Image (tube, grey):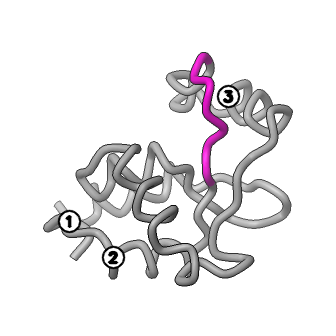
Amino acid sequence: MIDKKLTKIENKIIEVREQKVILDNDVAEIYGVGTKDINRAVKNNRKKFPEGYVFSLSQEEKLEVVKNFHHLEKIKFSPQLPKAFTEKGLYMLATILKSPMAT
């Protein structure tokens, strides 16, 4: 069971700007919350996410990841640019979210 969960998480790790990241909608799925909850947590706790923890993709980067990663097709028509979380950003987010999975 744990191996399946780890494999599922590993499959969501992508490389953007030469960094390994997980996009906000995948983080939401992993942590069992909505993408809006993820983005609200970041917005309401900006000081906890210094440079290098989280960044927004550009429109070009968004199109590139949608093209290259089949599981990200669901963000293709979203008007929002996804946020990319580095490992440090994921740890910080887990300390803020109130979901059992994040804990």
Q: How many circles with numbers are drawn on the protein?
A: 3
Element type where label 3 sits in the image: helix
Q: Is residue 40 left or right of residue 55?
A: left
Of 92 and 11, nearer the camera is 92
> Where residue 51 sits: x, y (%)?
73, 77
Q: Quadrant of the C terminus?
A: bottom left
Q: Quadrant of the N terminus?
A: bottom left
Q: Is residue 87 left or right of residue 44?
A: right
Q: Is residue 78 magenta?
A: yes
What's drawn in magenta, residue-wise? 77-83
- Element carrying mark 2: helix
Task: Please say whether residue 43 is one of the residues in the magenta stretch.
Answer: no
Instruction: Assign the magenta stretch its main secondary structure.
Output: loop
Q: Which residue is situated farthest in the top direction here?
A: 77
Quadrant of residue 18 within the rendered picture: bottom right
Q: On the image, numbered disc 3 is attached to which residue?
A: 66
Q: Earlier in the sequence, mark 1 or mark 3?
A: 3
Q: Is residue 16 above or below residue 97?
A: above
The residue singled out by tag 2 in the image is 96
Task: Determine whether 5 is above or below 66 in the image.
Answer: below
Q: Nearer the viewer, mark 3 or mark 2?
A: 2
Q: Amino acid at mark 2?
A: Ile
Indicate the position of residue 102 as horizontal and vertical percent values: 26, 69
Residue under numbered circle 1: 101
Please tell me which residue is depicted at 56% across the width and 56% down the height of the picture: 22
Q: Amino acid at mark 1?
A: Met
Q: Is residue 19 left or right of residue 25?
A: right
